[in-house]
Image (cartoon, helix red, strand yellow):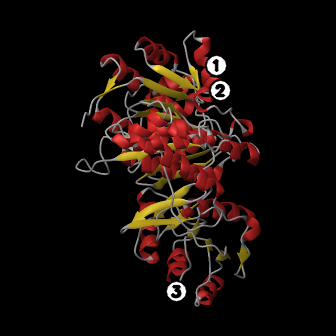
């Protein structure tokens, strides 16, 4: 079998024409016959280069408003014919079908049309039929045909044509075939996910990937599949690592709870908030967030819900931190924060988050709806004799939002919209509470008048008893234990207010 092929003809029909002109000129210089359709045919004609209309090959015009142009045996026969098969070649001769050695086709921009919130009919019209069929046919017959299925492949293809005088190797063609099926499978996945309402199957695809320096540890390989440019504008610093990305994900989801509120600042470490505060100014929010745990803040991820100004940047600059995220930075703030060459500065863009979350487990994937419920004042049920005050409600809801984004089992202690401490990832709720109390005392917090949030109900009254002895005055929890009354009775006996939300916030 001859594994090196000299191209004699090409079919070109693309939606995106950026970067196509040099390829057209190169194919023409090589004496390769070009077949084309519609807008691409006009583009080639306008370059002053000869092109054979597909309609001339098939003897059929483009019909159904352009839905059917290339779907014809004289096109697909020329692509799919096996050059080493005598019967295939005989049929090509019998029906006057030319061999097609190069197929350059891209697909209608389906995902961009969906993202633009276009009407459904416009979206449906961007489901490509001819293009996807041409790509599959050419990629299937990679032993004889090279398929260029995306404008992202133009430069590589042009280099091959230039370096090898129009000749391709089997390795070239197989490489482009793999790329083609990556394009087609991603495209079909996007269409399925748009149309699917209730079919319980797992279909995800990312056509952008990035190899990371390593995974969680240096001996592990790491990759990110997705497009960070859609979510962030990177202004400065080194590349994001695997662990950075996990912390950034946690930070973005946490600060989303405080969008549009007073200046709020969070410091995260290992996916959990170690400092958090809301104040009248952002600089004071940062200072008070840092006071929550200045030890853990070292090497952390920082995020704000509004523009970082010069005063805040000045305070941040003295701390070693990996990443700083905000909706924007003042010019003065940028000049200060760029003083550390490796510090990563990210502007968070306004984007919609996925409506389902995934994680690998065993030999499969777990999928669930995101936890989009945020506890509100209207949803609280006062269950104790002492009614919580308005200021306590503000702190309780503040604590609940942090609790929702902290690893279970968790307890969060808050006073005056400042995180005093959190107990995170413990195997019992009592352990989580005692961890939080110890931590709060380490950093000199007075818990008298503080509030406590729990991600799940208290099966026994031990937590409210421990909290009450520390001066905690109000508690927020889901409720739902068969022994809820024991906790309620203790609160009533010790003048502690407690509200139920009815919503558990486990985060494993």
Judging from the image, what secondary structure is the residue with disc 3 in? loop
Query: Which residue does the numbered mark 1 point to in the structure image?
Result: 42
Percent x, y for residue 182?
44, 44
Query: Which residue does the numbered mark 3 point to in the structure image?
Result: 460
Compared with 61, 383 (above or below) is below
Label at residue 38: 2
Discs 3/2, front = 2
Judging from the image, what secondary structure is the residue with disc 2 in? helix
Residue at the spot 54% in from the left edge and 12% down from the top edge: 49
Whether residues under marks 1 and 2 lie with C-beta atoms below 8 angstroms apart, the answer is yes
Compared with 443, 328 (above or below) is above
Residue at the spot 58% in from the left edge and 90% down from the top edge: 483
- Front-most of 324 and 124? 124
Label at residue 243: none
Q: Is residue 63 visible?
A: yes
Q: Is residue 290 visible?
A: no
The residue positioned farthest toward the top in the image shown: 48
Percent x, y for residue 432?
44, 71
Percent x, y for residue 275?
49, 51
The residue positioned farthest toward the front in the image shown: 94
Compared with 162, 176 (above or below) is below
């Amino acid at each position: 079998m001859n594994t090196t092929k000299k191209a004699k003809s090409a079919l070109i029909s693309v939606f995106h024409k950026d970067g196509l002109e040099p390829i057209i000129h190169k194919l023409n210089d090589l004496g390769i016959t070009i077949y084309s359709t519609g807008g691409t045919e006009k583009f080639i004609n306008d370059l002053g280069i000869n092109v054979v209309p597909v309609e001339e090959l098939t003897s059929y015009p483009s019909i159904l408003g352009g839905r059917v142009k290339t779907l014809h045996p004289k096109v697909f026969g020329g692509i799919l014919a096996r050059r080493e098969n005598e019967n295939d070649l005989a049929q090509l001769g019998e029906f006057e079908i030319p061999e097609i050695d190069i197929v350059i086709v891209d697909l209608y921009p389906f995902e961009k049309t969906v993202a633009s919130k276009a009407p459904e009919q416009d979206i449906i019209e961007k489901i490509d039929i001819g293009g996807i069929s041409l790509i599959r046919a050419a990629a299937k017959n990679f032993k004889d045909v090279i398929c260029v299925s995306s404008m992202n492949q133009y430069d590589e293809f042009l280099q091959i044509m230039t370096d090898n005088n129009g000749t391709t190797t089997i390795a070239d063609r197989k490489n482009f075939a793999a790329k083609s099926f990556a394009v087609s499978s991603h495209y079909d996945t996007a269409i399925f996910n748009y149309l699917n309402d209730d079919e319980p199957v797992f279909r995800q695809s990312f056509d952008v990937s990035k190899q990371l320096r390593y995974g969680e540890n240096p001996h592990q390989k790491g990759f990110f599949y997705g497009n960070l440019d859609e979510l962030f504008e990177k202004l400065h610093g080194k590349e994001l690592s695997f662990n950075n990305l996990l912390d950034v994900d946690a930070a973005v989801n946490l600060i989303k709870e405080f969008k549009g509120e007073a200046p709020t600042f969070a410091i995260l470490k290992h996916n959990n908030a170690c400092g958090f505060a809301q104040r009248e100014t952002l600089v004071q929010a940062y200072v008070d967030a840092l006071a929550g745990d200045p030890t853990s803040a070292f090497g952390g991820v920082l995020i704000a819900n509004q523009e970082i100004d010069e005063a805040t940047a000045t305070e941040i600059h003295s701390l070693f931190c990996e990443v700083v995220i905000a909706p924007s930075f003042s010019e003065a703030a940028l000049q200060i924060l760029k003083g550390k060459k490796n510090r990563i500065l990210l502007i968070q863009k306004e984007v919609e988050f996925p409506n389902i979350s995934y994680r690998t487990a065993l030999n499969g994937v777990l999928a669930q709806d995101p936890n989009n419920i945020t506890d509100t004042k209207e949803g609280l049920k006062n269950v104790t004799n002492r009614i919580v005050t308005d200021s306590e409600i503000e702190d309780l809801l503040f604590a609940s939002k942090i609790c929702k984004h902290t690893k279970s089992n968790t307890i969060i202690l808050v006073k005056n919209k400042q995180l005093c401490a959190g107990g995170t990832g413990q195997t019992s709720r009592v352990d989580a509470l005692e961890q939080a109390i110890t931590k709060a005392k380490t950093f000199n917090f007075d818990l008298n008048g503080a509030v406590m949030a729990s991600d799940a109900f208290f099966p026994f009254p031990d937590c409210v008893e421990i909290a009450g002895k520390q001066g905690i005055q109000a508690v927020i929890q889901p409720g739902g234990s068969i022994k809820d009354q024991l906790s309620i009775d203790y609160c009533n006996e010790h003048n502690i207010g407690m509200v139920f939300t009815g919503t558990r916030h486990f985060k494993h």
